[in-house]
Image: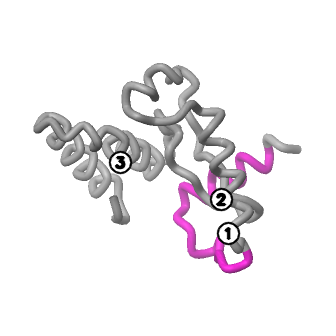
């Protein structure tokens, strides 16, 4: 699940699917997280909502495709979206945002932060 490019996370996703095929059902959430990360690293909305990013103020759930239902999340052992937002809020309380340099973040994240800031005006 660690890497620097969409290809890295696509490979993780495929490993997760292979594990599921081999009856390792615990890999469902892993595969969902890898798929979300693959989408996020392309600047696209994630499907399940498992990826969080710093926005300079807090940790937030990366954009989520609104067509994905909580029922579909449950099929992949992912909590409901409401719970994922709660987890991000709780994680922010335990995270020192002052230690994060936003200048070193990838361009897709910088672009999203600009968009989020415009949306909150």
Please tell me which of labels 1 and 3 falls first in the chain.
3
Where residue 72 appears, as percent x and y from the top left, is: 43, 22
Which disc number belongs to residue 95? 1
| Label total for image | 3
Q: Does the segment drawn in magenta span residue 64? A: no
Q: Which residues are magenta?
A: 98-118
Where residue 25 appears, as percent x and y from the top left, is: 24, 37
Circles 1 and 2 in contact, beta carbons < 8 Å? yes
Residue depicted at 69% across the width and 55% down the height: 90
Residue 96, above or below 35: below
Residue depicted at 65% across the width and 75% down the height: 100
Measure the alpha-carbon separation of dots 2 and 3: 20 Å
| Dominant secondary structure, magenta | helix
Measure the alpha-carbon separation of dots 1 and 2: 6 Å
Measure the alpha-carbon separation of dots 1 and 3: 23 Å
Residue depicted at 19% across the width and 48% down the height: 15
Circles 1 and 3 in contact, beta carbons < 8 Å? no
Where residue 119 appears, as percent x and y from the top left, is: 79, 41
Which disc number belongs to residue 91? 2
Q: Does the segment drawn in magenta span residue 103? A: yes
At mark 1, the secondary structure is loop
Residue 6, above or below 106: above
Please tell me which of labels 2 and 3 falls first in the chain.
3
Q: Which residue is mark 3?
A: 34
At mark 2, the secondary structure is helix
């Amino acid at each position: 699940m660690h890497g620097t490019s969409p290809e890295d996370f696509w490979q993780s996703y495929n490993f997760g699917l292979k594990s599921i095929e081999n009856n390792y059902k615990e890999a469902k959430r892993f595969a969902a997280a890898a798929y979300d990360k693959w989408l996020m690293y392309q600047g696209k909305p994630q499907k399940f909502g498992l990826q969080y990013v710093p926005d300079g103020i807090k940790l937030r759930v990366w954009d989520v495709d609104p067509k994905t239902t909580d029922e579909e999340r449950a099929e992949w052992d992912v909590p409901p979206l409401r719970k994922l937002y709660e987890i991000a809020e709780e994680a922010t309380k335990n995270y020192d945002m002052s230690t994060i340099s936003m200048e070193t973040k990838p361009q897709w994240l910088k672009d999203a932060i600009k968009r989020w800031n415009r949306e909150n005006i």
